[in-house]
């Protein structure tokens, strides 16, 4: 009987072991996939392994020993090369979910969002390049330290002035903590992924910071005036109202509980909207289109053309 239990325990342990290794390989592939640098490095490792195998078969002991040293140092080299990805992964593991760490009230958050969106709208019209990162649960202190410290309440005028071409702080990113501009001219590690060629250094930097932190980054293109968001390593182009809606959805703390009177009001509202006429529905559809993404850049698409919505 006890032998049977031992066997079952052994089988469960084996299955768990295989699952754990499988999960590790899956995570590593997910982290590094579609990254041309990774493919090159993997090819390099493969070449060294083949040479090492050949040297063992042919009995070239000294050469085989040198290959061993290469492989040992290779692990260290990999850790250094993939430092941003590994660091991002560890930070994500230790992340305290999307808890809003700021003490902003809903009104303050809405006001901040409106200031940011107004600034982006103006900069989009005047084709002023901008990079604005909003801190979420993960601290961005390391990146704030690369820029010029500020501690000013977010306003559209200030953002417009910072990114005005030719001013000392227009290069680099603005980082927002709470409703304050923590710094300007910050430097982000650019992504190593293959981006469509129409995107340059600014977009690379935005995708880079979104890969290693949970921050939200807004990019205004100097070339086209297009407004994009970089979140979780994905780039999405939005119309102005889409940007506002996105920020409202993500940054405004969720209502804890709705009261009975609110519930009655919402039910009444949904009953009224259910009886809307066709033309009113059409109008609603039109309004909704203004908040739809214009383009989502699909990094896993091999032609790198991005996919349009
Ligand atoms: N690593 C970085 N971190 C922060 N800001 C950066 C970084 N790299 C570039 N930038 C900013 O991007 C500007 C250059 O943008 P560039 O024109 O190359 O990018 P782009 O993605 O083509 O954007 P645009 O559509 O605005 O031309 C720099 O002047 C600088 O302000």
Image (spheres, grey):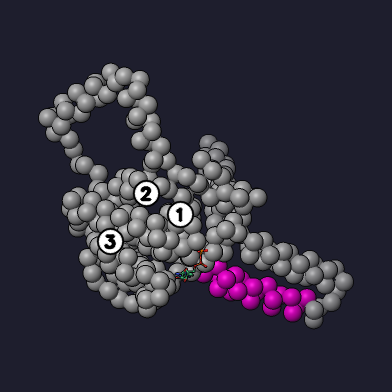
Residue 2 lies, in percent from the top left, at 52, 40
Find disc 3 in the rendering and name its residue: 156
Query: What is the distance, in whole Å, between disc 3 and disc 1 at their CAs?
Result: 17 Å
Question: Can you tell me whether the CB of the residue at mark 1 lies under 8 Å from the nearest atom of ligand 1?
Answer: yes
Find disc 2 in the rendering and name its residue: 240
- 236 lies left or right of 94: right
Q: Quadrant of residue 269?
A: top left
* Residue at horizontal 37 percent and vertical 70 percent from the top: 164
Mark found first going from the N terminus, 3 or 1:
3
Q: Nearer the viewer, residue 282 or 244?
A: 282
User: Which residue appears farthest toward the bottom when viewing the image?
Assistant: 62
Question: Can you tell me whether the CB of the residue at mark 3 lies under 8 Å from the nearest atom of ligand 1?
Answer: no
Badge 3 element? helix
Q: Are marks 3 and 1 in contact (CB under 8 Å)?
A: no
Find disc 1 in the rendering and name its residue: 226
Rate crowding at label 3 as few (under 14), some (14 to 19) or many (20 or more) other CA atoms within 10 Å.
many
- Magenta region, residue range: 64-86
Residue 18 lies, in percent from the top left, at 59, 48
């Amino acid at each position: 009987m006890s032998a049977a239990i031992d066997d079952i325990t052994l089988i469960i342990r084996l299955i768990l072991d295989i699952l754990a290794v499988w999960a590790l390989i899956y995570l590593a592939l997910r982290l590094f996939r579609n990254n041309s640098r990774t493919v090159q490095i993997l090819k390099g490792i493969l070449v060294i392994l083949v040479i090492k195998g050949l040297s063992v078969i042919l009995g070239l002991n000294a050469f085989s020993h040198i290959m061993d040293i290469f492989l040992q140092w290779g692990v260290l080299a990999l850790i250094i090369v993939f430092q941003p990805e590994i660091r991002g992964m560890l930070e994500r593991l230790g992340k305290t979910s999307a808890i809003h760490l700021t003490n902003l009230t809903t009104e303050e958050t809405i006001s901040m969002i409106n200031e940011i969106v107004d600034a982006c709208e103006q900069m989009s019209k005047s084709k002023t390049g901008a990079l604005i990162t909003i801190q979420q649960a993960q601290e961005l202190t390391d990146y704030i330290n690369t820029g010029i410290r500020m501690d000013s309440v977010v306003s559209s005028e200030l953002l417009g002035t910072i990114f005005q071409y030719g001013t000392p702080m227009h290069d680099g990113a603005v980082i927002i903590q709470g409703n304050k501009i923590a710094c300007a001219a910050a430097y982000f590690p650019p992504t190593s992924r293959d981006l469509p060629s129409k995107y340059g250094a600014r977009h690379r930097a935005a995708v880079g910071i979104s890969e290693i932190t949970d921050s939200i980054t807004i990019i205004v293109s100097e070339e086209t005036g297009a407004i994009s968001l970089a979140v979780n390593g994905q780039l999405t182009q939005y119309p102005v109202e889409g940007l506002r809606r996105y920020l409202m959805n993500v940054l405004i703390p969720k209502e804890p509980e709705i009261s009975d009177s609110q519930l009655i009001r919402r039910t009444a509202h949904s009953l009224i909207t259910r009886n809307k006429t066709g033309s009113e529905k059409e109008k609603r559809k039109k309004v909704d289109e203004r908040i739809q993404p214009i383009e989502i850049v699909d990094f896993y698409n091999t032609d790198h053309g991005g996919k349009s919505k």
